[in-house]
Amino acid sequence: MEQPIFPKEVEIGDEAIVILWDDGHRSPYPHRYLRLRCPCASCIDEMSGKPRLDPDQVPQDVRAVDHMPVGNYAFQFLWSDTHYTGIYTFKVLRSVCTCIPCNQARAQE
């Protein structure tokens, strides 16, 4: 069974949200990149799993203005476009990491 990985630190910077994980991995997420991957029912159809969010409706300069933990498994972000209903599990966050080693690993899959 895979050991769970937990965030140690979250920094909301000007360009990105950066999560430092307890295994030492550092994950940068550009704000709009993460906003466009919101998993809430308003952004993803619950039955089909198809995106409902129109990327053209999300401002280019959208950014996270705050975050809060959800239980011991996820974060919820408050976005500058007033969206706040998405719950981003740690597993999902780790799977969409934008760092070079993670991008290279996904490209090899």
Image (spheres, rainbow, N blue to C red):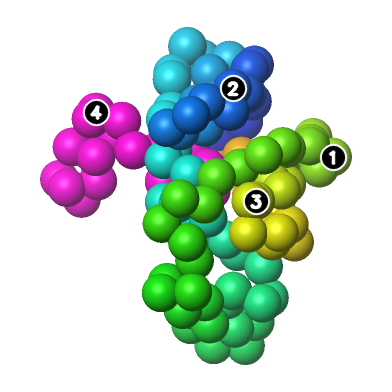
Q: Residues within 10 Å of mark 2 (few under 14, many from 20)?
A: few
Q: Which of marks 1 and 3 is in front?
A: 3
In the image: residue 16, left or right of residue 83? left
Asked if residue 104 is among those painted magenta in the image, a careful observer would answer yes
Q: Earlier in the sequence, mark 4 or mark 1?
A: 1
Task: Look at the image and give the residue range highlighted in magenta.
Answer: 92-109
Q: Mark 3 points at which residue?
A: 79
* Amino acid at circle 4: Pro
Secondary structure under the numbered disc 2 in the rendered image: strand
Q: Where 17 falls versus 36 (above or below)?
A: above
Q: Are marks 4 and 3 in contact (CB under 8 Å)?
A: no
Number of the label disc, if any, that sits on residue 41: none
- Tell me which amino acid carries mark 3: Trp
Circle number at residue 101: 4
Q: Residue at x 49, y 66 (%)?
A: 58
Q: Nearer the viewer, mark 3 or mark 2?
A: 3
Q: What residue type is labelled 1?
A: Gly
Labels 1 and 3: the sequence-earlier one: 1
Q: Which amino acid does the dot numbered 2 rest on? A: Glu
Query: Residue at image x 41%, y 40%?
Result: 30
Looking at the rendering, which quadrant does residue 19 occupy?
top right
Cα distance between the residues tagged 1 and 2: 19 Å
Q: Main SS type for the magenta part?
A: helix
Front residue of 100/73: it is: 100
Pair 1/2: label in front: 2
In-front residue for pair 68/57: 57
Give the CA distance from mark 4 to mark 2: 20 Å
